[in-house]
Amino acid sequence: MRSVLPVLGSLLILVGSGTPVGRAVADQSGLAPVLNAGDQTLQFDWPALRIGTGEYEEGPTGMTVIHFPHRALAAVDVRGGSPGTVFTDYLRLYDRPDLDAVVFSGGSGYGLEAVTAVATALKDDGVRGGWFDNIAEVSGAIIYDFGERRLNEIYPDKRLAQAAIRAARPGIFPLGAHGAGRIAVSGGLFGCDAYSGQGAAFRQIGELKIAAFVVVNSIGVVTTRDGHVAACYRDPGWPQDLRTADLIAAFPANLNVARASSKGASKSNTTVSLIVINRKIGQGALQRLAMQVHGSMARAIQPFATQFDGDVLYAASTEEIDPPGDPKWQSFVDLQLDVIASEVMWDAILASVPAQPAVPDTEPGAQPTPKQLRRYAGVYAFSPIARLKVTVEGRELRALANGPRNVYAIGRDAPVMLQPLTSTDFTVPGRHPMTLHFDRSGTLVINPGHWEQIGRRRPD
C-alpha cells in the first residue's frame, strides 16, 4: 500500500505572510506523474495519431492528449449546458482550422491548464514556435471530477500535462478509469453512480481509418445496443436485468432513491469525445460529421446533453487519403461515413466502462476485540477539505466527518456505525461500495484499490 506521508505533507502546508492564519493550501509539486497506465488498451495502426495519458494517483485524477504530429483539420460540436473548453471558437470561425492536439482533462476549470500546457510543451520542445503560422494549436475540454467522488482537490496541472505529451506514443489507448477518465462516473441522475472512464474504438475499411475516443462522465447511463444499462449500482428493488427505457419511464418516481447516493447525484457532468478519419474532407462536411456523431451518442448515453452536461465532440481529419467515387455522389459518401463513425463512437462509449467494485458483503463476520477497536480511534486527515473522526462506543466503531465536508456516506451531523467485515475492514452498508481499511501504521484507506482515498491519523 502506498505511503501517504509525502502527499499529506505537501497538502497540509500552512502558509505565512499574506494568507489568513490557519488556511491550508495545496502544493502538488511532490506528486509523481503516472504515464500511460492501464492494462486494458485499444491497439491500432495509425502513426498520424499519438496518445499520452497522465495521472496523479493521489487524486485520483488525470488527463489525456491525442497528438497529431502533422496536424489535422478539425471541427467541434458543443452540446449540453455546462461546457468547459479552450480554443473552440478558432475551430468555428477560422476558414481552415488545423490542430496539433486535442486534450481531455479532469479537474474541472482548473484542468484547462492541461490544455494550454500541451501547447507550451510543443513550443518548449521546438515543435512549434512564435511565428504567426507556427503557433501551437491545441484545443481541449474538461470534465468535473471533484465533489463527493473524492476527498481532495488535486487537479491535472502543467507538469502532468507536459509529461503526458512528451510520453505520447502511436497506436495505444488505455481503456477504462485512466487518463482523463481516472475517476469519472456515470448515471448520477438515477443514483447509479457507476465508475466510468475513457474508451476508444477503431475501424478500418480498405484505406479508410476511423477512430473514436471518449471520456464518459455523464449524468445519464451508458446503454448497450440491446437497451440494457451497462453499469449501475442498483436500488435493491430494481431488477438485475435493468433496461434504460425502464429507468427513464419510471423517472422521476425514483428521484428520491437517486438522491440517496453515497457519492451524490452530481449536477456537473460531461462527455468529451473525438472522432478522427484519415480521408480528405471539406470543412463543412467535417462539421456535419461532428454533428451527426455527437447526435448519435444519445443512443449510447441516456439522457444526453442535458443542461448539467458539458458535452463536447471534436472531429478531425489527418487528410492522408483522397475521397472515393464520383464527386456528384460525394454527399452520399459523406453520409455513409457519418453513419459508420457513429457506430464506432458507440463502441468507444461501451469500452469506457471499467469493472465495478462489488458492494461489500454485510453478513456477520469477524468481531474485532475492544483492544483492536481502540487502536483505530482517532482523527484521520485526507486533505485540507476532508477529515474523519473515529471513536469507540462499547463494542462498536463509529465515524463522523469533522472537516468542511462529508466523507461519502459518513456525514457531519451524527456518528455512523462502521459494520465489521474483518478485524481490520469495516463498511457502511448501503447501495454503493464503501470499505474502510485500518492499518497498524495509522493509515485509513477508504475503498482500497483503484479508486482508494488515503487518510493519516493526526497526532493526539
Image (spheres, helix red, strand yellow):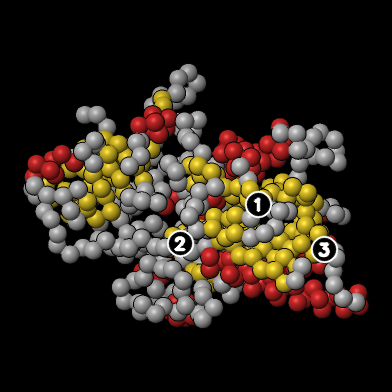
* The C terminus: image quadrant: top left
Mark 1 crowdedness (10 Å alpha carbons): few <14, some 14-19, many ≥20: some
Residue drawn at x 32%, y 63% is 358
Is residue 131 found left or right of 367 in the rendered image?
right
Q: Quadrant of residue 312?
A: bottom right
Tell me the distance, in whole angstroms, between the alpha carbons under discs 1 and 3: 19 Å
Is disc 3 surrounded by few (<14), some (14 to 19) or many (20+) residues within 10 Å? Answer: some
Residue 8 in view, yes or no: yes
Amino acid tagged 1? Pro
- For label 2, the SS is loop
Q: Is residue 176 above or below residue 444?
A: below
In the picture of the structure, the residue carrying the numbered disc 3 is 321
Residue 28 point in image, percent of width and height = 49, 33
Left or right? Give the position of 78 relative to 12.
right
Q: Which residue is mark 2?
A: 354
Q: Are marks 1 and 2 in contact (CB under 8 Å)?
A: no
Q: Position of residue 19 (x, y in %)?
A: 47, 24
- Residue 170 is tagged as 1
Q: Most extreme residue toward the top, as rendered?
A: 17
Residue under the image location 82 percent in, 40 percent down: 134
Quadrant of the image occupied by residue 434: bottom left
Pair 3/2: label in front: 3
Q: Position of residue 119 (x, y in %)?
A: 70, 40
- Quadrant where the N terminus sits is top left
